[in-house]
Image (tube, rainbow, N blue to C red):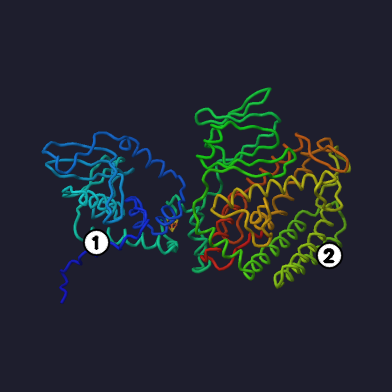
Amino acid sequence: MTSKHQIPLPLPPSPIRDNTPLVPARMVNEWVYCPRLAYLEWVEGEWADSGDTAQGKRAHARVDKSGKQLPSPEDLGDEMLKTRSITLSSERLGVIAKMDVVEISEGTAMPVDFKKGKRPHVASGAYEPERVQVCTQAMILEDNGYEVPQGALWYVGSREKVPVILDDELRAKTISAISALRDAAASGHRPPPLENSPKCPRCSLAGICLPDETNLFSKKYTPRPLNPSDDPALPLYVQTPGARLRKSGERLIVETEEDSMEVPMIDVSQVVLLGPVSVTTPALHELMKSEIPVSWLSTGGWFLGHTTGTGNGNVAVREAQYRCAFDENRCLALSRNLVTAKIQNSRTMLRRNWRTEREDTTSKDQALERLKRIAKQAHNIDNVQQLLGAEGEAAAIYFASFENMLAKHPRSNLPNFSFSTRNRRPPTDPVNAMLSLAYALLTRTFTTITSAVGLDPYMGFYHRPRHGRPALALDLMEPFRPIVADSCVIQAINNGEVKPKDFIFNGPACSLKAGGRKALISAFERRMDQETTHPLFGYQVSMRRLINVQARLMARHLQGEIPVYPNYLPR
Ligand code: SF4
């Protein structure tokens, strides 16, 4: 018989398997706040700083400096003592905690956790996740032989100390949270996102978790703009032959024979080195530690490779990617999806950018009609060879019309560029030289982004793996070729940013001189910064950020969280 006053006894923690890492007490707090947050951070190693996390670091700055040592339980006397930054663990519970402060008084110990901000006005004195974290610390102290009558939270913002009563209910909740997090980690299943939760707008991982974008497919509500619309850090390009990149404190310094320039490392999202440019070892170490990728390009802009730190440790997403890559049907479905999107976006480019001074509207209508038909066919094709054929046919129609997007400047002093067909390796005319460089910049962008979100850029679904070829980056960038790479080439030409004197011919090969390369790179980066409304999610986002979201959505699709990979199809 159970009475209504009966308090459930805490269940024992779930058994710890061999090699199970100890769960940090902070992650138990996160689990109670949002299970997906704890999973993303602890199991998948995701992290993103926000205003809140930066404030939290400041609040801990003093207590993180270790001070007096914590005496052993037998040596506790009656005197009062404050010890800081104490790390202890409990094998029984499978948890570890770095305690901000442990106060010793009258032979007992009390963990005190520091929180930024002010004390919340709630009946229990503090939010549940924070009380669970303190309870975890208290139980670790108990398992190490200390008597712990209660815990406490110190709110830095209001300078108030709130006691945490260690009753049976809180202990049961704590043990159950520890077990649930460990079981989730062992299962390899990421918990689903919260639904329309007010917690998400404050969550530093919203841009990684994509809660509303993921829920869109199952719950059908419009996503809130939780993603930052742009990344404040930008790529740093170094292309002067002989330039040297070094670091000084928190800054990167680019030195050439003539001058030098400095940039704070926090403002740099990636470093792009073109041609004979060197980097010092300390600079490279710092870039790797900060997870800022370094891309190496030939002088002509050919993407040679990139250097990263230890990279994204999320093995589960790569496992899902490889499983898909070995499944012919899934590869075909993804290939069809990406190729169809590329054809649709090529059509959108022509429709939007066909110059009015090019009077041939009949051929415009014909080209758009043919591309529409091929996109429809591609959507239903059931083998890769036919898909390659459809892609080739669409590319031939698109590039046959490409010149119609280039401005004719009959009376201005701006030069006219002509284009008849796409050629490469080597490109033989200025427009093809620009297209080749723009595609190389796009390949570099997708390679670093796919790698940063935990995918393997070299294992694709449409492009087959080949030594040194970033097949997945090439797959994902297909729909973006017309709307990013071709678009920036067209803008650079039509705005008169590149001129015929910016090109050099060597036999049949045409390439850009340094000035032309610089102009095209800045047109490319401008395009990446341009804000656009995501047609599916409805919010404003920069192209740079959007590509990041798309790479994450591909990861979510591969792991089964969303049924289809949603392409970006501007109208
Ligand atoms: S964004 Fe929302 S669902 Fe995602 S981890 Fe954060 S709180 Fe959880």
Q: Element type at marker 1?
A: helix
Left of 554 or right of it: where is 408?
Answer: right
- In which quarter of the view is residue 410 placed? top right
- In which quarter of the view is residue 64 placed? top left
Left of 461 or right of it: where is 416?
Answer: right
Q: Residue furthest top?
A: 258
Q: How far across and how far down the image is residue 201, in percent?
A: 44, 53
Q: Front-most of 54 and 356?
A: 54
Q: Nearer the viewer, mark 1 or mark 2?
A: 1
Left of 510 or right of it: where is 549?
Answer: left
Residue displayed at 41% across by 41% down: 54
Binning the other alpha carbons within 10 Å of mark 1 as few (below 14), some (14 to 19) or many (20 upward) gives: some
Q: How far across and how far down the image is residue 232, in percent?
A: 55, 42
* Residue highlighted by disc 1: 172
Residue displayed at 82% across by 51% down: 423
Q: Element type at marker 2?
A: helix
Residue displayed at 32% across by 34% down: 65
Q: Which amino acid does the dot numbered 2 rest on?
A: Gln
Above-or-below relation of 27 to 241: below
* Residue highlighted by disc 2: 366
Task: Please state, as top left, top right, bottom left or bottom right, where the C terminus lies in the image.
Answer: bottom right
Can residue 195 be seen here? The reply is: no
Q: Quadrant of ligand 1?
A: bottom left
Binning the other alpha carbons within 10 Å of mark 2 as few (below 14), some (14 to 19) or many (20 upward) gives: few
